[in-house]
Image (tube, rainbow, N blue to C red):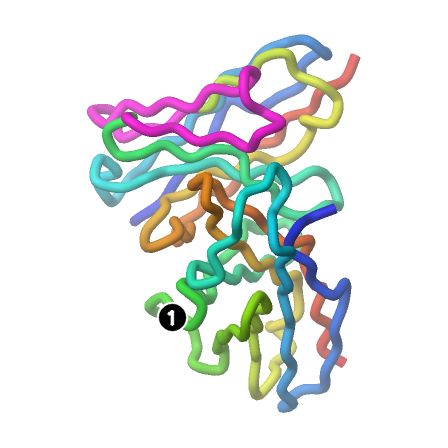
Amino acid sequence: QSALTQSASVAGSPGQSITISCTGSSNAAGGYKLDFDLVSWYQQHPGKAPKLMIYEVNKRPPGVSNRFSGSKSGNTASLTISGLRPDDEGHYYCSSFTSASTVLFGGGTELTVL
Amino acid sequence: DVQLVESGGGLVKPGGSLRLSCAASGFDLSDLSMGWVRQAPGKGLEWVSSISPTSSHKYYEDSLKGRFTVSRDNAKNSLYLQLNGLRGDDTGVYFCGRENGGGRPTDLWGQGTLVIVSS
């Protein structure tokens, strides 16, 4: 079980907004602490490599739509997608940097666009 | 084009070894940390390892320490992952990635190479 917990699935209609959350336990496996200032979010379509959508909580890489935004509150990070589009459908993973200089991924959330 | 291309995956028996390679093109990886992430069939992403630009620091997922070894050859613009003592639960797609930024987010990914561990 990951120390970063994501809901298994979320759904929304085209044009709507959805939010995916990523909650960290106080200590990751092995006693490492999670750094929630260094959370990233990835989108993955079936059979494809992941794509970085958000890094350092709320920064977007070049080319990523401003429909994607990130935030955090305490030990919970969130990814919000506004103006849902059919091609937003896929899996979304959060990741956090740890005090051991390792990286931990959340279990992933499957987004369905109805 | 800026890209990463993995190779070296395949079918291997339990206890066997493989060496995965990741060739970078369109950019110089010598200034960046690089890493490996894997994904078992139908499962989520699992971070495997990272290596600093000069190879001075190497990091591994705890459960993989001692079996996997990451290395790089900046002169060849390449990254490697040596997999030893392979087990069935090591089966999956292995992605290499360019880490760029605080917390080492992976901003460029290869297409992945499939490792199947089976007798």
Residues A11 and B10: in front is A11
| Residue B97 image point, x, y percent | 42, 42
Q: Nearer the viewer, residue B67 or A64?
A: B67
Residue B31 picture quarter = top left
How busy is the neighbourhood of tag 1: few (under 14 within 10 Å), some, or many (20 plus)?
Answer: some
Q: Quadrant of residue B51?
A: top left
**Residue B78 drawn in magenta:** yes
Question: Compared with residue A10, is residue A42 higher up or lower down, i.e. above or below?
Answer: above
Work out which quarter of the rendered image holds the C terminus of chain B and state it: top right
Q: Which residues are magenta?
A: B56-80
Task: Give the residue at x 43% y 59%.
Answer: A38
Where is mark 1, residue-wise? A59
Q: Is residue B70 magenta?
A: yes
Can you give x and y, in whole percent of width and height, for residue B11 in the image?
A: 67, 18
Residue B82 placement, left or right of B45? left
Res A55 quadrant in image = bottom left
* Pick the front one: B95 or B35: B35
Q: Report the label total.
A: 1
Q: Is A92 above or below relative to A28?
A: below
Instruction: Decide if residue B89 is on the left or right side of residue B35.
Output: right
**Point 46% across, 23% down: residue:** B81
What residue appears at the point 67 percent right and 14 percent down from the top-left corner? B12
The chain under label 1 reads A
- Residue type at tag 1: Lys
- Judge left or right: residue A11 versus residue B10: right
In the rendering, at what x and y percent does residue B85 appear? Answer: 63, 12
Q: Is residue B5 above or below residue B11?
A: below
| SS at mark 1 in the image | loop
Spot occupied by residue A30 in the image (x, y as percentages of width and height): 61, 37
The residue most toward the bottom is: A15
Residue at 60% x, 72% y is A87
